[in-house]
């Protein structure tokens, strides 16, 4: 199942958005993250051209599917779980969740429930009247001195967290490294080469080799890279021998 | 140390951005997430008014501090660690990191190193010529059928991940629940009330009580909530007794 299929029960509900440009940006952001359902409450007269300009033509299908509603109660009536977004941290409004925590919850909850992510107007955010409908609250972390996020940025962060939470648990495993046999073969060859050009102290050839080993160990070596280094070393040896008087 | 203080060595480098509006949005997003350094390469003639309109007046200080450069090599010369952002997943360009992984790395790396987050132009993204400078690559996950993010949204996701990674490890611990003694007192009171109104079967009064217990246990009860429920129950009992003929 794709991440988008996992989150098909999640909708974005915009309460009285003021700027058509933001709605366009939101349509694009939602589509980037596999969310296709947008409901707009109390703002039916947004300029379509401005929306399209900011959504790019690739997200106009999301604009076409926007549902418009006059009443918030009616807009939310079919949802089983409603999450309010707010920057205000009034104590009476808690408990607040981080976008990450709520995203993990929603991927599970939305399997059997229709979920609404409710966002308020650009200037004032959600008021208590709208927050009443919400079972959970989410606040996007930001610096204390400048909490006010652009509306489309706030939507993007939530959609991105949900998309990420819905991704199959990919182990961001390191790549497959070269085998020790390959690597030791390379060190042997380098050592011969460095001895030949007089870089290594014959009495303690391993002193500089240890530094080189540490460097390569730190970066890690792919099989392909070992082959490249050995190829370069071979070529160096060859040209030195053939240039010798 | 605040998250912003932890990431003061991180800069956003925009290579040939096309739209002043995007730069304005980026200034706002960066400031929201405590990042104040922006460098613009190869685009000195962006419309200031359009930038300000989108940054909001609260982020004009970030606009004032933008450094402009003609040459990418010069712009990046002082950085020790450069991260390229790309949507293209060409094999030769890997290994790719998720924003979350790179953010965790950068909070550590930026303690002793100047870090640049490099973003390409809106339409084409970074080309191999710019990616050459990068020690690491990051790709924002998105749906296969619509990978193209708005530039300011891409910047916001990276900044948000970095800010979140720099936050002190807050345990999003559940709240402090009511003590068992409080809760049992409440159940006793409810049981008496429900018996009084004939809701409970006198032969098996605990049958419905068990359902109520399960419901309350699932939601969890704060001390304050137990007091409210007990208050309501007391009031109900009182009014029933005083209304009886």
Image: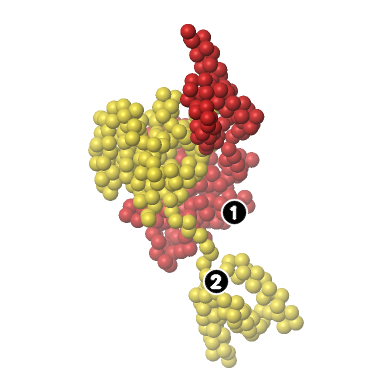
Chain colours: A yellow, B red
Residue that mark 2 sits on: A177
Q: Residues within 10 Å of mark 1 (few under 14, many from 20)?
A: some
- Outermost residue toward the bottom in this view: A245
Which quadrant of the structure image shows residue A187?
A: bottom right
Q: Is residue A60 left or right of residue A136?
A: left
User: Which residue shows up at 52% across the image and 62% down it?
Assistant: A173
Q: Residues within 10 Å of mark 2 (few under 14, many from 20)?
A: some
User: Which residue shows up at 41% across the image and 29% down it?
Assistant: A133
Q: Nearer the viewer, residue A193 or A218?
A: A218
Chain designation of label 2: A
Distance (Cα) linking label 2 and label 1: 23 Å
Q: State the image coordinates of residue B205 (x, y, percent, origin top left).
A: 53, 30
Instruction: Give the secondary structure at mark 2.
Output: loop
User: Which residue shows up at 27% across the image and 36% down it?
Assistant: A67
Residue that mark 1 sits on: B109
Instruction: Give the secondary structure at mark 1.
Output: helix
């Amino acid at each position: 199942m794709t991440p988008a299929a996992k989150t098909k029960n999640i909708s974005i509900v915009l309460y009285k958005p003021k700027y058509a440009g933001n709605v366009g940006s939101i349509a694009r952001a939602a589509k980037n993250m596999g969310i296709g359902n947008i409901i707009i409450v109390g703002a039916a007269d947004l300029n379509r051209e401005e929306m399209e300009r900011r959504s790019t033509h690739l997200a106009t299908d999301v604009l076409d599917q926007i549902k418009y509603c006059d009443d918030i109660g009616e807009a939310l009536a079919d949802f089983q779980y409603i999450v309010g977004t707010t920057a205000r941290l009034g104590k009476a409004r808690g408990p607040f969740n981080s976008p990450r925590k709520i995203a993990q919850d929603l991927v599970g909850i939305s399997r059997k429930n229709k979920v609404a992510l409710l966002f308020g107007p650009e200037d004032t955010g959600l008021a208590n009247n709208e927050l009443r409908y919400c079972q959970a609250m989410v606040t996007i972390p930001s610096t204390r001195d400048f909490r006010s996020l652009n509306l489309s940025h706030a939507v993007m962060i939530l959609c991105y967290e949900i998309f990420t939470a819905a991704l199959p648990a990919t182990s961001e495993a390191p790549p497959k490294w070269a085998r020790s046999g390959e690597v030791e073969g390379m060190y042997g060859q380098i050592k011969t080469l460095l001895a030949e050009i007089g870089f290594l102290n014959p009495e303690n050839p391993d002193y500089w080799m240890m530094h080189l080993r540490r460097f390569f160990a730190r970066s890690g070596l792919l099989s392909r890279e070992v082959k490249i280094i050995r190829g370069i070393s071979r070529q160096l040896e060859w040209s030195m021998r053939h240039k010798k008087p």
